[in-house]
Image: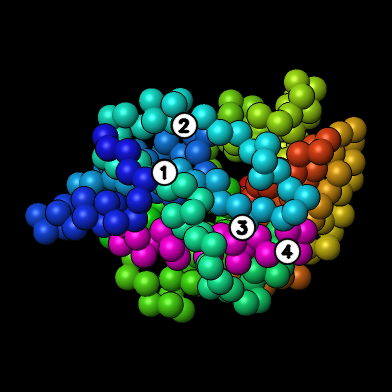
Amino acid sequence: MKLVTTIAVLRQELGRCRKKGRRIGFVPTMGFLHEGHLSLVRQAHKDNDVVVVSIFVNPIQFGPKEDFKMYPRDLKRDTGLLRGCADFVFVPPARELYPDDFCTFVEVRGLSGEYCGRTRPGHFTGVATVVAKLLNSVAPDTAYFGQKDAQQAAVIRKMVGDLNIPVNIKVMPTVREPDGLAMSSRNTYLSPKERQEAVVLFQALKSAEHAVGTGLCDTQKIRGMLEDFIAHTPSARIDYIELVDRKTFERVKTIDRDALLLLAVYIGKTRLIDNTLLRAGRRQ
Ligand code: PAF
């Protein structure tokens, strides 16, 4: 496994691989890796000949009052976890991606301003910009993202389509803790009590799946039911509950087609997100 810090060296190394006809899989991350990331890396390893993982805490996707400074970082631990399943770890210093005169941003209009984008203005422009730069630098055959960040995956798919970036985007299932909590680097912010209560997101998703399975289709009623459910957890405060078309991400009024239930809930001061697919017309 090689640690690379510049785009020039990365391109040189990957150019050689490409000349030999090797397929390149790419997993962009912000580090502090957990099983969720590692499942993407393993899939990339299965599908490709060469695996590149980037570790970069992208400053421009954090708002001024967000957790950029305190975001967990541990490069030594991360590289240890990647040994054996990644070929290149790309760890650029901020200057490499954002020199002083940097002034070009990628904005995926519409979707970027909704849901998480409402609470985190500018977040998805930061994500789309860095992912575009990383895809440009790595030029992978396939790039891997997690379903937990469903809106991010949709923004990236749209960007890749609109900008004709020649890459296949693969979105892999959410990896969960034994109690159902979706794995996230931000789970480390939770106190032991909050960690216990954070399972409410998963339980809420399950209760919605059950309700839809028994015939509840009205999304306003589903939202009301979930608000009552989450209200029983003292440390929880709802940011949003949205039911959207799984492809277009437009809000739906009734589950007459498969829909995504998107949740963002603060547990104490930590904002967590999760989602599930609600299948239309499937009575339990
Ligand atoms: O999902 C993440 O970790 C980040 O948003 C990403 C895709 C690596 C871009 O910084």
Mark toward the start of the polypeptide (1 vs 2): 2
Q: Determine whether the residue tagged by mark 1 lies in a helix, strand or loop.
A: loop
Q: CA distance from mark 1 to mark 4?
A: 26 Å
Q: Amino acid at mark 3?
A: Ile
Q: Position of residue 253 (x, y in %)?
A: 76, 70
- Disc marking residue 75: 2
The residue wearing badge 4 is: 121
Q: Amino acid at mark 1?
A: Val
Q: Is residue 250 above or below residue 202?
A: below
Is residue 3 among the parts visible in the rendering?
yes
Residue 73 included in the magenta stretch of the image: no
- Contact between marks 1 and 2 (CB within 8 A): the answer is yes
- Contact between marks 1 and 4 (CB within 8 A): the answer is no
Residue 136 included in the magenta stretch of the image: yes
The residue wearing badge 1 is: 91
Mark toward the start of the polypeptide (3 vs 4): 3
The residue wearing badge 3 is: 60
